[in-house]
Amino acid sequence: MQAPVSTGSQARVLRGLSVFAPFLLLASPPASAQDFDADGLPDHQEIIFGTDESSPDGDLDGYSDAEELARGTDPESATSSPSGAVHGVATSARSDSGTLSLVSLLYAPVGSSNLDFATFMLVGGVEVEVTPANLPPGTIVRFLPTADPSSLLVYIELLLPEWLLTANKTVSFKTEVYDGGPAPLAMAGTYAVDVSGVAVAVNNPPSGGGGESGSSSTYMPLPKVSELPAGYQSDEICTVDLVPVGTSGSAIVYQVVSAQCEEYPDALCMPSDCAAEVGSTLELMEF
Ligand SMILES: [Ca+2]
Ligand SMILES: [Ca+2]
């Protein structure tokens, strides 16, 4: 396990991000957010990210799973390790006991003095901007250790009542990282959609949503396995093909034209609900 962030580094961070200070005092993960390897990523979140929940550095390359996610390398491959002094961000979501969590991992290299971020959420056609100046109550902020203790890695978890997703069917969000200038230095986003009352993430969304054109999207369930309805099968995932059929405000409306469970390691799929998705629509914010 890596050493925690040094006191000196943390003091510097707090000067640079003093607006976070009240939230650091409040920050405490939900009781259910177990973190077996104590790396700052809850077990349930690591399963969604596909990282090793039993080791803070799954591929033993010296960079933590969280740092590799934020810096865009593969936490499960020792031949894929971060390099270069560039900012990074990764996003994900999870659903836990009626709470929808929107997770952002921010990385700033050595020399960063004005790390800043903005998260844009699209809920029910309304866009909301969250910045360090207006973090909602209960937001979890953690500074995580990095291979170079002079760099910064910040875990931010925005907590929303899950009924917002159930009622609106789609919650999109993206996080942009800034460092003193007007232009974002890194950006990432995640879509959560409601499928038969279960929050799922849309991975590899269609082009315009950041995915590869012509490829299929997959639905990743966001609740803990113990909270999924009976009938989910392991090692399969719902693969869907989406076609754009219109717009709704700043979102693109997609229709599911085919859906099936397919083999996928460490995933879960409910065959009946997956097939029932054909013909349904979802709204994805254009990133
Ligand atoms: Ca963990
Ligand atoms: Ca690693």
Image (tube, rainbow, N blue to C red):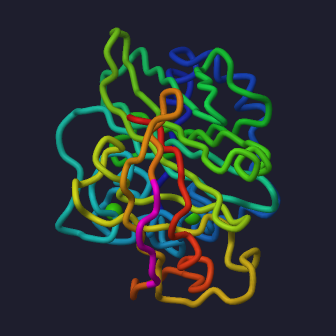
Q: Residue at x 36, y 31 (%)?
A: 108
Q: Residue at x 47, y 79 (%)?
A: 237
Q: Residue at x 79, y 64 (%)?
A: 32
Residue 43 within the magenta-colored segment of the rendering: no
| x, y percent for residue 23 | 73, 29
Dominant secondary structure (helix, strand or loop) of the stretch shown in magenta: strand
Q: Does residue 172 appear left or right of residue 25 in this picture? A: left
Residue 276 image-quadrant placement: bottom right
Q: Residue at x 57, y 57 (%)?
A: 41
Of 41 and 125, the residue lying toward us: 125
| x, y percent for residue 29 | 74, 50
| x, y percent for residue 20 | 64, 23
Of 31 and 235, the residue lying toward us: 235
Q: Does residue 94 appear left or right of residue 28 in this picture? A: left
Q: Does residue 277 appear left or right of residue 82 in this picture? A: right
- Residue 268 vs 57, above or below: the answer is below
| x, y percent for residue 125 | 61, 31
- Residue 15 vs 37, above or below: the answer is above
Residue 187 image-quadrant placement: top left
Of 46 and 208, the residue lying toward us: 208
Residue 79 image-quadrant placement: bottom left
Quarter placement of the C terminus: top left
Residue 257 within the magenta-colored segment of the rendering: yes
Of 39 and 280, the residue lying toward us: 280
Q: Quadrant of ligand 2?
A: bottom left
Report the number of numbered marks. 0
* Residue range highlighted in magenta: 255-261
